């Protein structure tokens, strides 16, 4: 089942893209679904995309049609597997792209290697034959990067996003935040991990956050702060809202079950609202009130995201105000 298109670029680059692929063989459905999702993702990121099943007029006019489209394209994307290597139609499409010196981006779907016509070309393929990296954000980002329209990563561990200064405390070496004006996107594959936190302190606040992700057990989002050996937090984690305070002399915590958590996981989207003042703390998840408790966390806290994710995590910081 296709997910909603995912936009990670800020601008509308308007690149024309030709996608070459084969749906024959045992991986036919996988390739079909992959190309269909990529068609949508590239389109919302400003590309004009041509794929056979979407745009072909069929019949005897097809040969002239694909040649014209390849000639007018800015980039030629080839999904290469055994079926594609044996396809005479793909061979003709590649020859046309080479004839017109089109930049070719080759995505390797199995271990058969590059297409024979491209072995002598100085191309760096996008590996997609490792199941640990088979996720849409990995593929989309690397294709946009090859087309020189991907968003850039922050130069260091600190970055500005959503009108706040953030710091990266922990991340996998090859992954980093991607920021634009209204969101922070964490890109990953298999089991990636990242810990980011605002530099700004909040001493009582009302805030509404929205996040989209394939939720993992250890993913935590909310307010948190360490003071030496003391920790204070109000966070959403694994289907519970946790309010914690701990230190050298012991710890206390209280959790509240999120009754609509299974629906949150299915929709891969959560709206977290925290209303926090000196008297009480109220937390809502997707407009459902989860708790209304006496405030026991009375320290300035930071907005923090400690995420484990196997695809992507998008954080949108919608609103905040001091109480």
Image (cartoon, rainbow, N blue to C red):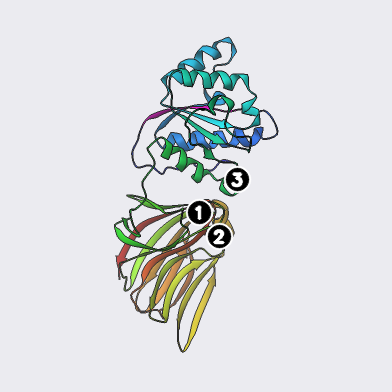
Quadrant placement of the N terminus: top right
Q: Secondary structure at mark 3?
A: loop
Q: Residue at x 63, y 38 (%)?
A: 111
Q: Is residue 112 visible?
A: yes
Q: Upstream in the sequence, badge 2 or badge 3?
A: 3
Is the magenta region chiefly helix, strand or loop? Answer: strand
Q: Residue furthest bottom?
A: 249
Q: Which residues are magenta?
A: 14-22
C-alpha distance separating marks 1 and 3: 21 Å
- Please state which of residues 199 and 4 is positioned toward the viewer in this rendering: 199
Up/down of 155 relative to 77, above or below: below
Q: Is residue 5 visible?
A: no
Corner quadrant of residue 195: bottom left
Give x and y (percent) for residue 310.
55, 53
Q: In the rendering, which numbered label is found on residue 213? A: 1
Give x and y (percent) for residue 304.
41, 65
Q: Upstream in the sequence, badge 1 or badge 3?
A: 3
Q: Which residue is mark 3?
A: 130
Q: Residue at x 59, y 36 (%)?
A: 33
């Amino acid at each position: 089942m296709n997910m909603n298109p995912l936009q990670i670029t800020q601008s509308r680059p308007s690149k024309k893209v030709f996608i070459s692929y084969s749906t024959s063989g045992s991986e036919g459905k996988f390739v079909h679904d992959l190309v269909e999702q990529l068609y949508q993702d590239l389109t919302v990121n400003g590309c004009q995309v041509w794929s056979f099943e979407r745009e072909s007029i069929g019949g005897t006019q097809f040969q002239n049609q694909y040649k014209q489209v390849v000639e007018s394209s800015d980039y030629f994307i080839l999904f290469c597997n055994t079926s594609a290597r044996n396809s005479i139609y793909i061979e003709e499409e590649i020859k046309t792209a080479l004839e017109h010196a089109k930049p070719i981006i080759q995505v390797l779907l199995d271990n058969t290697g590059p297409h024979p016509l491209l072995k002598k070309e100085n191309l760096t393929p996008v590996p997609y034959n490792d199941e640990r990296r088979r996720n849409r954000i990995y593929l989309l980002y690397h294709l946009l990067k090859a087309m020189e329209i991907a968003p850039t990563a922050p130069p260091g561990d600190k970055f500005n996003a959503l009108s706040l200064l953030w710091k990266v405390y922990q991340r996998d070496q090859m992954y980093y935040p991607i920021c634009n004006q209204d969101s922070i996107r964490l890109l990953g594959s298999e089991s990636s991990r990242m810990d980011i936190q605002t530099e700004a302190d909040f001493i009582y606040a009302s805030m509404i956050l929205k996040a989209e992700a394939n939720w993992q057990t250890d993913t935590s989002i909310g307010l948190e702060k360490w003071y030496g050996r003391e920790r204070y937090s109000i966070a959403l984690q694994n289907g519970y809202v946790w309010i914690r305070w701990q230190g050298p002399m012991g710890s206390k915590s209280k959790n509240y079950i999120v009754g609509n958590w299974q629906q949150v996981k299915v929709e891969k989207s959560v709206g977290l609202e925290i209303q926090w003042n000196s008297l009480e703390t109220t937390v809502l998840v997707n407009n459902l009130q989860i708790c209304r408790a006496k405030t026991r966390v009375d320290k300035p806290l930071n907005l923090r995201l400690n995420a484990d994710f196997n695809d992507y995590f998008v954080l949108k910081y919608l609103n905040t105000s001091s109480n």
